[in-house]
Image (tube, rainbow, N blue to C red):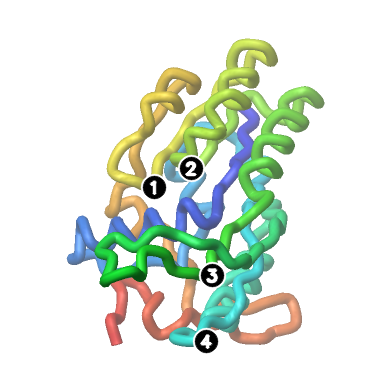
């Protein structure tokens, strides 16, 4: 059975952070080998392609090293055969929101809101296109974004492909459960087994190491 994987990068990232809190004995485990992960999820399938959807992050006032940590991981992923990274964008804009606990006459505050744009649309587009052009029999969608329910349903019902949804969160949303052929939750033990080597060595012989807090079983320093 030909398989293709569609991975929602930020949904997975925040799911792994929550996974650390639910199963602290497994630590961070964000230095994740995505091909190996998908092969663990569908061991009998022939994995032809992995599509990873993300966006470039920017430095924050309290976290200037954020882009460097992401870049190390993206460079490591680019060494994996059959894996393509698709980039969306981050948009930052000023919004006015009500205060939860107003102080005197001050009831509103201006805040900067950063939103990731494009990943869900890009994922849905390639999920549908690859099915339409008969590039897989089984799609593995790693996300718990309920906005993907309709494209998942369309692939299953209209294009007659199997879709396995894997949630990085504690449960699969009801909409995705109804839309998918099958669904499951990502387990800590599976994540712990699917870490990239340290170091990853790229085609030019350069060594790529994880950020200090991303190592196997999670250094917390």
Position of residue 135 relative to residue 26, above or below, is above
Residue sitting at the far right? 133
Mark 4–mark 1 distance (CA, rounded to whole Å)? 25 Å
In which quadrant will I find the N terminus? top right
Position of residue 175 relative to residue 112, above or below, is above
Between marks 4 and 1 in the image, the one whose residue lies nearer the viewer: 4
Crowding near the residue tagged with mark 3, few <14, some 14–19, many ≥20 C-alpha atoms within 10 Å? few
Q: Are marks 1 and 3 in contact (CB under 8 Å)?
A: no
Question: Mark 3 or mark 2, which is nearer the start of the sequence?
Answer: 3
Crowding near the residue tagged with mark 2, few <14, some 14–19, many ≥20 C-alpha atoms within 10 Å? many
Q: Which residue is mark 1?
A: 168
Name the residue located 40 percent from the left edge and 29 percent from the top edge. 183
Q: Are marks 2 and 3 in contact (CB under 8 Å)?
A: no
Secondary-structure class at tag 2? loop
Secondary-structure class at tag 1? loop
Name the residue located 25 percent from the left edge and 64 percent from the top edge. 101
Crowding near the residue tagged with mark 1, few <14, some 14–19, many ≥20 C-alpha atoms within 10 Å? many
Q: Are marks 2 and 1 in contact (CB under 8 Å)?
A: yes
Q: Which residue is mark 4?
A: 65
Name the residue located 49 percent from the left edge and 69 percent from the top edge. 111
Name the residue located 29 percent from the left edge and 87 percent from the top edge. 221
The disc at residue 112 is: 3
Mark 4–mark 2 distance (CA, rounded to whole Å)? 26 Å
Q: Are marks 4 and 1 in contact (CB under 8 Å)?
A: no
Depth check, front residue: 110 or 4: 110
In the picture provided, is 115 more to the left or to the right than 205?
left
Residue 137 horizontal/vertical position (percent): 64, 24
Depth check, front residue: 93 or 204: 93
Residue 79 horizontal/vertical position (percent): 66, 67
Q: Which residue is mark 2?
A: 143
Residue 31 horizontal/vertical position (percent): 46, 69
């Amino acid at each position: 059975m030909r398989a293709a994987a569609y991975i929602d990068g930020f949904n997975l990232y925040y799911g792994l952070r929550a996974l650390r809190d639910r199963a602290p004995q497994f630590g961070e485990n964000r230095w994740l080998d995505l091909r190996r992960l998908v092969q663990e999820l569908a061991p009998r399938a022939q994995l032809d392609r992995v599509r990873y959807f993300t966006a470039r992050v920017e430095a924050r006032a309290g976290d200037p090293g954020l882009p460097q940590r992401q870049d190390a991981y993206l460079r490591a992923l680019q060494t994996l055969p059959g894996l393509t990274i698709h980039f969306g964008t981050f948009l930052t804009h000023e919004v006015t929101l009500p205060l939860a606990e107003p102080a005197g006459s001050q009831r509103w505050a201006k805040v900067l809101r950063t939103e990731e744009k494009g990943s869900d649309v890009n994922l849905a587009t390639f999920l549908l296109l690859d099915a339409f052009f008969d590039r897989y029999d089984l799609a593995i969608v790693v996300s718990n974004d309920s906005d993907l329910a309709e494209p998942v349903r369309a692939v299953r019902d209209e294009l007659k492909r199997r879709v396995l949804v894997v949630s990085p969160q504690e449960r699969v949303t009801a909409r995705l459960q109804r839309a998918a052929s099958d669904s499951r939750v990502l387990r800590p033990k599976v994540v712990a087994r699917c870490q990239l080597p340290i170091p990853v060595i790229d085609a030019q012989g350069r060594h790529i190491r994880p950020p200090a807090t991303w190592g196997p079983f999670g250094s917390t320093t």
